[in-house]
Amino acid sequence: SDLNIVVGQLFAAMVNVIFRHYAGGWRWSMGVAALPATVLFVGVCFLPESPRWLAMKGRRADAEAVLRLLYDREDVSGPLEDILTAISLEGEKKDAKRGFGGLMKRGFGKLGSIWGVKEIRRAAFLGIGLMAMNQFSGINTVMYYSTTILVQAGFSQDASIWLAAMCCAAQLVGVCVSVASMDTAGRRSTALRSCLGVVLTLSLLAVSFMYKGDPLWDYVKVVALMLYLVAFGSGLSGVPWVINAEIYPLKLRSAA
């Protein structure tokens, strides 16, 4: 998911590069975003319903049909039994028949289970803390305003648009490193390495803005910005999402 998002950012940046000299080019850039959205809309129209939801509603035959489509085989009794067992353990089928009241009761019950058990509460604090680090490390500011930052650094508007596309490519490199190394190096080591890189590169970027008008420091700003995105992509970009998907019991994962 993280890799796909960053690839999408790179494509969006390249669209900005293509339309940078057109009159009202930003309108074309915004309009092009409607193309993948249209493809997604059309695809969803042909998307089958979730087999878990169908089983939860008691539509076993429909659930089997969807599972046959997904697994491309006739015998889907194993996956279907796994789904039915999970639903039985979580009590979803019973609550689903109660409508909105049952849904609210189950939702608040799961939230109570998260904060009422010490071990799960600690996991929740860990997950929230990691997501806070993901956001407070400045990635949104850098990605949304990279062109403005580069213009303030002394580069032309045209050059800044190109460099902003290179910034997206730099984050893609970092994410590829994360995907390749996370399972071998471990989540903790990957996150620590990324945090150290983010701290160092952001510090270098901050120092470089103290020297305005110096061509050498202008290039240092670009290098620091690129290295920051590589460092962020190599860990802080994806590790918080992965850990949050792994640290909660299955029956509480959706609520958490």
Image (cartoon, rainbow, N blue to C red):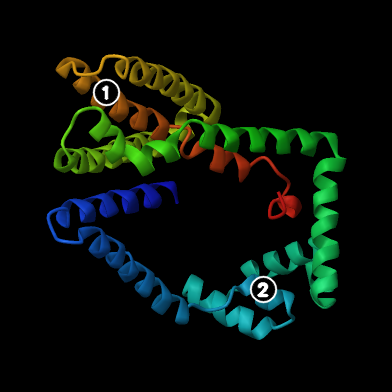
Residue farthest left in this picture: 21
Q: Is residue 148 visible?
A: yes
Q: What residue would you read off at disc 1?
A: 221
Secondary element at image label 1? helix
Q: Residue 245 location in percent, x, y?
A: 61, 46
Side of 81 where 97 appears, left or right: right
Disc number at residue 28? Answer: none
User: Could you tell me which residue is drawn at 75 percent across and 54 percent down?
Assistant: 251
User: Could you tell me which residue is drawn at 79 percent across and 72 percent down?
Assistant: 93
Which amino acid lies under the numbered mark 2 shown in the image of this protein? Trp
User: Could you tell me which residue is drawn at 52 percent across and 79 percent down?
Assistant: 48
User: Could you tell me which residue is drawn at 21 percent across and 22 percent down?
Assistant: 218
Q: Nearer the viewer, residue 159 or 195?
A: 159
Q: What residue would you read off at disc 2?
A: 53
Secondary element at image label 2? helix
Q: Is residue 46 visible?
A: no
Q: Nearer the viewer, mark 1 or mark 2?
A: 1
Q: Residues within 10 Å of mark 2 (few under 14, many from 20)?
A: some
Name the N-terminal-most of marks 1 and 2. Answer: 2
Side of 99 where 191 appears, left or right: left
Q: Vertical placement of 137 versus 58: above or below?
A: above
Q: Nearer the viewer, residue 244 or 68?
A: 244
